């Protein structure tokens, strides 16, 4: 994260360029990381899509998303198991109102990971 923040703070021309791309909030961090010394640490594995899903990205480890006929909104706590198995850094298309159960499930696991990590 320090690397990304440093890029943001020291490269105003890049920031301006990204500001006019579509959609900048979904490209900025990925672009910085793919052009960084960390690029070789980012895997380009292929994921097996969930049933009925289509994939449109070769680099699915950064953001997990599905675009079948309509946009998939992840809204069930059970989706956590599928999402965590992707090893993606981000998930798109969750909403506070529709995905509250999933977000609560994520919080439970993150809390547990922090507690377990603190014990070691």
Image (cartoon, rainbow, N blue to C red):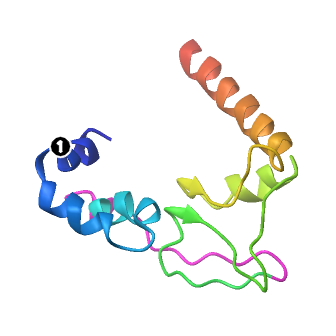
Quadrant of res 71: bottom right
x and y percent of residue 84 in the render? 68, 52
Position of the C terminus by quadrant: top right
Residue sitting at 63 percent across and 28 percent down? 113
The answer to whether residue 28 is above or below residue 95 is below
- Work out whether residue 118 or residue 5 is closer to the camera in this orientation and state it: 5
Q: Residue at x 47, y 74 (%)?
A: 59
Q: In screen coordinates, is 7 left or right of 101?
A: left
- Judged from this view, the residue extending furthest toward the top is 119
Residue at which label 1 appears: 9
Main SS of the magenta part reads loop
- Whether residue 38 sits left or right of residue 84 in the image: it is left
Does residue 59 show up?
Answer: yes
Q: Is residue 38 magenta?
A: yes
**Local crowd at mark 1 within 10 Å, few (<14), some, or many (≥20)?**
few
In the picture provided, is 117 more to the left or to the right than 109? left
**Boundaries of the magenta span:** 37-52
What residue sits 82% from the left and 41% below the top? 100
In the displayed structure, 105 sits above or below 40; it is above
Residue 87: where, in percent of width, then height?
A: 59, 57
Is residue 64 found inside the magenta-colored segment of the image? no
The picture places residue 63, in percent across and down from the top left corner, at 54, 63
Residue 38 placement (x, y as % from top left):
26, 57
């Amino acid at each position: 994260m320090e690397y990304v923040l440093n890029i943001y703070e020291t490269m105003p021309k890049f920031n301006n360029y990204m500001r006019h791309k579509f959609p900048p909030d979904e490209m900025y961090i990925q672009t910085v990381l793919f052009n960084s010394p960390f690029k070789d640490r980012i895997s380009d594995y292929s994921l097996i899509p969930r049933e009925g899903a289509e994939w449109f990205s070769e680099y699915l480890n950064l953001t997990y998303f599905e675009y079948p006929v309509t946009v998939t909104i992840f809204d069930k706590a059970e989706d956590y198991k599928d999402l965590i198995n992707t090893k993606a850094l981000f998930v798109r298309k969750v909403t506070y109102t529709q995905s509250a159960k999933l977000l609560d499930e994520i919080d439970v696991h993150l809390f547990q990971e922090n507690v377990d990590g603190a014990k070691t």
